[in-house]
Amino acid sequence: MRITVIGSGYVGTTIAACFAELGHTVTAIDIDEEIVETINDGRAPIDEPGLDELVADHVGDRLEASTSYDAVPDSDVTFLAIGTPSNEDGSIDLAALEAAAEATGEALADKSERHLVVIKSTVTPPSIETVLKPAVHRGADENEHVEVGMNPEFLREGSAVSDFAHPDKLVFGATSAWATDRLHAVFEPLLEDHDVHVVETDPQTAAMIKYANNAFLASKISLVNDLGNVCKEFGLDAYEVMDAIGLDDRISEQFLRSGVGWGGSCFPKDVDAIIAAAREDGYEPALLEAAVEVNDRQPARLLELLSEHVDLEGARIAVLGLSFKPRTDDIRNSRAIPVIERLQEHGADVVAYDPVAIDPMRERFPEIEYTTTAAEALDGSDGAVVVTDWDEFATLDEEFDAMARPVVVDGRRIVQRRDGITYEGLTW
Ligand code: NAD
């Protein structure tokens, strides 16, 4: 098939290259010339395992990038993969996506065959009917050959290419059998090779499935963190408790690791957005609000534990791990940010280390000290907090001997306890 993908950011580039890998002919469209040049030079504009190789393999053959929407009418399907960032009140900012939807419609105004425009971006269900469909149809001058569908994306940063190739489910939100068939045709090669659940539904339900999925996972972690805090109060190990409840099939063993909370570009934004959308409709989603509150509380609890051992005023505190999770340099909504902010509020001198995320964090906190190894950060410090579970922190050992006061508060259960250090687990 011929596919156009509008927006070549994280999701857009991944799906464009992966569609080419499936055998489709793909044009990746972005307003950013640098991104377009990068792709046409055979490189991915973002850092993601395996993506550079895929782009290099297919550029000049089944994949090309462009700043123009000219390829849209000649394609069979168009995917919209534009960012939907948060507004101040947590709702999503649809301005960029609406503009792209309208421009896509304009490119299709004269098309005399049916064309499917698929929203890939994460959007609230009501916005499909109130903002996005109207934008496409307005742009297309109400051309009745143009139809709008929804196919939410579930890939995770750090394993995006493999997640695309091995989805646990595909959700097709469509308003006609023709549109559903078209989505089947796009993903046909994946469906042939793997046992994938396909959920066929309407676009609004498809959009809600994405939010419900992320809200459920984020809430599961917050519930585990809340219970973990209770375990800590009782002097119990939350991991022993959670390992046991994970044996219950209805609970499952996944996402039971308690710690300093969830971050990244999706969970916080998506939970905030669905709360804001529900509120706008007059409903207060109490459990989701509590999930956010527990998540906001975890960094403070980490520092409360540290201050039981160290007077933070004027103390040199090592922060180990800055990215929101290991194997990425993404610091968006990383728990390291509130941890550093609170340390500063308490008058501590922060020295931070991360294997890959120092540069982005330096932009956020230019005033703190950064080191190139964990050992340097620990050297002479009065305490350390672990915020990201990078593998290398599991092998830290004699590095702790160089601390002025060897107090370690672990927010991710990664450091090995040993004699000679005061070790506190956040929920164990
Ligand atoms: P992104 O910000 O990385 O990429 C968006 C791209 O769209 C940018 O390159 C931008 O230049 C381009 N763009 C903006 N306006 C345009 C226009 N009018 N025409 C053409 N291009 C335009 O965003 P992302 O992380 O890829 O996220 C896209 C959507 O997918 C969001 O709704 C997000 O919530 C959702 N999502 C993201 C992930 C993830 O892990 N990043 C996972 C699942 C779903």
Image (cartoon, helix red, strand yellow):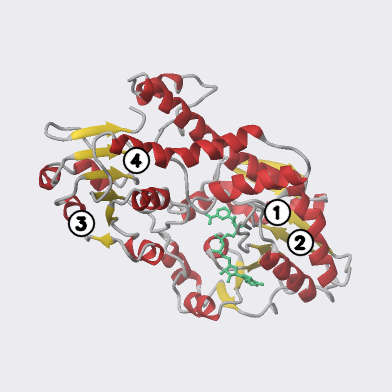
Distance from Cα at disc 4 to Cα at disc 3: 22 Å
User: Does the beta carbon at disc 1 come under 8 Å from ligand 1?
Assistant: no
Horizontal arrangement in the rendering, residue 185 relative to residue 145 (left or right):
left
In terms of sequence position, does the residue under pointer 2 or pointer 4 come before the other?
2
Horizontal arrangement in the rendering, residue 125 relative to residue 343 (left or right):
right
- Circle 2 sits in a helix, a strand or a loop, which is it? strand
Q: Position of residue 96 (x, y in %)?
A: 67, 67
* Occupied quadrant, residue 51: bottom left
**Residue 223 seen from this side:** yes
Circle 2 residue: 116
Distance from Cα at disc 2 to Cα at disc 1: 9 Å
Q: Which mark is residue 303?
A: 4
Q: Residues within 10 Å of mark 2 (few under 14, many from 20)?
A: many
Distance from Cα at disc 2 to Cα at disc 4: 51 Å
Circle 3 residue: 373
Horizontal arrangement in the rendering, residue 291 relative to residue 388 (left or right):
right
Q: Cβ–Cβ below 8 Å for labels 4 and 1?
A: no
In terms of sequence position, does the residue under pointer 4 or pointer 3 come before the other?
4
Looking at the image, is mark 4 or mark 1 nearer the viewer? 4
Quick check: 29 above or below 11? below
- Image quarter in which the C terminus is found: top left
Q: Position of residue 237 (x, y in %)?
A: 33, 23
Quick check: 287 above or below 20? above
Q: Cβ–Cβ below 8 Å for labels 2 and 1?
A: yes
Q: Amino acid type of disc 3?
A: Thr
**Relative depth, front residue between 99 and 139:** 99
Quick check: 286 above or below 276? above
- Circle 1 sits in a helix, a strand or a loop, which is it? helix
Circle 1 residue: 183
In terms of sequence position, does the residue under pointer 2 or pointer 3 come before the other?
2
